Structures are given as C-alpha cells and as structure tokens.
Amino acid sequence: MSGSAKSLLFTAVLCVVCSLLLTAASSGLRPYQERNILIDRHRNVLLAAGLIEPGRKVGEAEVEALYAGRIRELRVDPEGRILEGAERARPDGLPLYLIQEEGEVRGYIVPIDSRGLWGPIQAYLAIDRDGQTVKGFAVTRHAETPGLGGEIEKEWFRRNWVGKKIATREGTFVSVAIAKGKVEEGVPESKRPHYVDGISGATMTGRFLTAGIRDSLSRYEPVSIRFRRNQIAEWEKTLPPARP
Amino acid sequence: MTTAAARPWAAVRRTAAYKEIVKALWRANPISKQILGICSSLAVTVQLETALVMSLALTGVTAGSSLAVSLLRKAIPRNIRIIVQVAVIATLVILADELLKAFLFDVSKQLSVFVGLIITNCIVLGRSEAYALNHPPGQAFLDGLANGVGYSSVLLGVAFFRELLGSGKLFGATVIPEAFYRAGYVNNGLLVLAPGAFIMIGLFVWLEHTLLERK
C-alpha cells in the first residue's frame, strides 16, 4: 500500500473511532446534562426574581422546592391572555413566569432571547407587579468573552438592573438600555431610570443585549400593560390559595 | 531523619515514577520552567476549586493522550502525525468537557472556554510529540501524568495565594477571621484580577529558579 493511501486509511479509522467515542459520551451523558441545565435555568429564574440572595450557594433540592413554591409557569397569547389546556400548545404562545407569595402575584418574569457577539444570550428579567419596575436580571446562557462581555452574568452587573423602569411614569414603554460606560457620566438625569451601567470593552455585547431586551419586552408589552393597569385579578385566580 | 525511616523512601526514590514526577515538579516544570500553559493558569486561578478541576482535567487529558499516542506510535504515518495527535487530544478534551457538564455543572460554567482550550495547551501536544511518539505506553503515560502534576502544582499554588489574599477564602470558605477585617485588614483586589496572577506566577518562577540554583 502506498504511503498516502495508508495515511488516508489511518485518518479514516481514527475519525470513525473518535466520532463513535464522542457520540457515545454525548448521548450517554445527555440526561445528566439536561437535568443540570434545567436546574440552572430554575436557579436563574429565582435569582432574577430576587428569591435567592446572590453569592449564596443553593443546592439542587432547595432550588426545586423554591421554584415549585414561588414560581408559576404560564403561557400567554400575544394579547396577554392566559392560554389554558389545549391552547397552551399554540405556536404563537409565549412563556411567562409569575412570582407568587401567599396567593398573590408579586411580579412576573419575562424570558429574554437576544443575540450576542458570539452566540445567543438567554436571560430573565423580573418585573414588579406595578408593570414597570425591574426586580432583577439574570443570564442563564451566553457565549460572550470571559472578562468582557462575560461580565453580564456577574453580580455587579445584575445588581445594576434592580429598580430600573421599563416604562415612563405615564406608562409609555421605553425598555431599559445598557449605557456606554457609567450611567451617571453619560446619561441625562431624566433618562437614568431607563439605563444601566455598561461594561467597558464589551460595547457590542451591550448593544446586542439592549436590542434583545427591547424586542422581548415589546412582545410582552400587553402583559406589562395589564400589570400597569392592575388588571390581574384573573391571573391571581390561577394561583393556589394562600396557606392558612 | 533516621535511617530506618529513610529506607522506604530510598526505594521509592529509585522508581521511574518518582523521578519523572520530581523532574516535572522542579527541573522541567511545564509552567515555571518551560513557561507553557500560562493562559489557563492566569484565567482559572481565582479560586482553588476551579484550579483543582482544571488541574484534574488537564492531567487526565495529558496522561490519556500520551498513552493513546504511544500505543499508536508505530501505526501513525509520520506525515500526518500532528493531525493525528490533535485529533486524539481534541477527543479527550471534549470527553472531559462533557463529563464536567454532566457532573460538575457549576464549575464547568465557571471554567467556560478554558476546558475547551486545553486542546491548544502546549503542554499536551508538547509531551505527546516530544515524548509519547517514541516511548513505550507505560513511560509515556507516566510522563503525561508527571507533567500534569507539575502543571497542577503551580496552578494550585497560585490559586491558593490568590484566593487567600484576594478574597480571604480557601475552597470558598472564609478563613480570614472577621476580627482581622474589623482591625482594618483589606483583601487585595489586585490578586483577583489577571495582573495579580501574572505577578504570582512570576514569583513562582523566581522561587523555583532560585531554589534550583542553590542546589
């Protein structure tokens, strides 16, 4: 057999062996990985809702217990009506999470799907029951550069969001944008409630995330309007009753 | 040291494993003597936990790839040997990454790209190309293991000082007593940042070179 034919054959065999190994590992480990991702998603929903203090390590069991007790997963249609039963499978339905306590809605959580510099960014933005004040923000998946865009998942950046407003006092939607640099330095006083501090060296990540948040929030604007007008009695009925 | 206690050590000292590991720890330490693998040692040494997991992953990959390349060394066609080695290393790195994602999800999130970047770590390809390709499997495996241990020693050393002085913690548990902070002690923020790691690694290089010179 000639030299190059041998090389080709060797490469082919090596590739097949490597791919078999990787396929076996990938499919064998998938159930574990998917469970980890689910727990991590729940943990970030709770983090956005402010139900887990930042920096504290919370075990799997505690995450699941908190999530089951305090978060309610709903699907709503684009007009902000709750979808029930068979309607839940509607393709234009949107996932929404309610934060509940003792039979009352304390706020809601909007999933954010955004582009990033290197790949999609998935995050959660929790909003108070007034329909405009941000309760918290947490990133659950991203592929940004560690140390630059990757800072979006850090606590200092998340803390930035608490108390910001997605709408003006009159109720007009404006979203919350990521400023270039510090808010105090570059944003006029009247607009500061709608801006958070940017990350230096990650202008593009900020720009993508700002657009992604605006898109996601505008899709959920009918829901936010219901909250702003306090028309959520129907929603509260869906909650389990308060414990005596 | 008494002679009775020294004797079992003498036997251990004669073994090939001992010699290899000592060599990789001191005379030919991948980080502090050969200045390889600096990128990951700057990035993952903020905490001991991430440094430990990274060390285990790299040691596993280096030992595994050296063993595999050594087993295949007679079959690998010379003209494509680098590609073959990279394929073997890449497979092992992806395996390590998948395992971390399945069983150590939080740490794997913190390590992010750095596990994947083991592929480009010069230590792994260096040992495989320079040693495993022309040594039998047993020795090659040992050499990979020894170099992994050498890498880990510096990584853990740097992480120990960075976590202790930078955040006052070890393995995430606070060790600097509250009273110190009340008395005015402040964590050194520089050590949490990458330049702090650079200085720390520099100190390790200096220490190792000076100690060796004395001998």
Image (spheres, coloured by chain):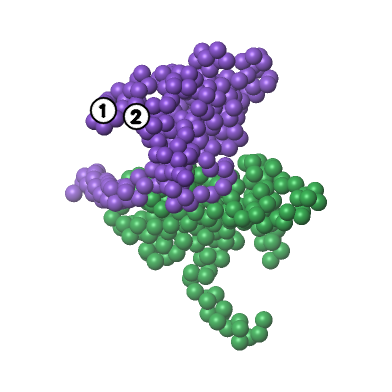
Image position, residue B203 (x, y; %): 69, 51
Where B208 falls versus A222 (above or below)?
A: below
Q: Please name the residue shown 48% across and 71% down the image.
A: B16
Q: Please name the residue shown 48% across and 22% down the image.
A: A230
Residue type at mark 2 is: Arg
Residue type at mark 1 is: Glu
Chain painted in green in the figure: B
Residue behind mark 2:
A75
* Residue lying farthest to the left in this orientation: A1
CA gap between label 2 and label 1 equals 9 Å
Q: Is residue B157 visible?
A: yes
Image position, residue A120 (x, y; %): 41, 29
Chain painted in purple in the figure: A
Q: Are marks 2 and 1 in contact (CB under 8 Å)?
A: yes
Image position, residue A5 (x, y; %): 21, 44
Q: Earlier in the sequence, mark 2 or mark 1?
A: 2
Identify the secondary structure beneath mark 2: strand
Instruction: Tell me the subunit letter for badge 2.
Output: A
- In this view, the residue in front, B129 or B79, is B129
* Residue lying farthest to the right in this orientation: B183
Where A131 falls versus B155 (above or below)?
A: above
- In this view, the residue in front, B197 or B102, is B102
> In the drawing, does residue A236 fall left or right of residue A147?
left
Q: Please name the residue shown 61% across and 82% down the image.
A: B6
Q: Which mark is residue B114?
A: none
Where A154 falls versus B78 (above or below)?
A: above
Q: Please name the residue shown 50% across and 32% down the image.
A: A106
Residue behind mark 1:
A87
Where B190 falls versus B9 (above or below)?
A: above
Q: Is residue A89 visible?
A: no
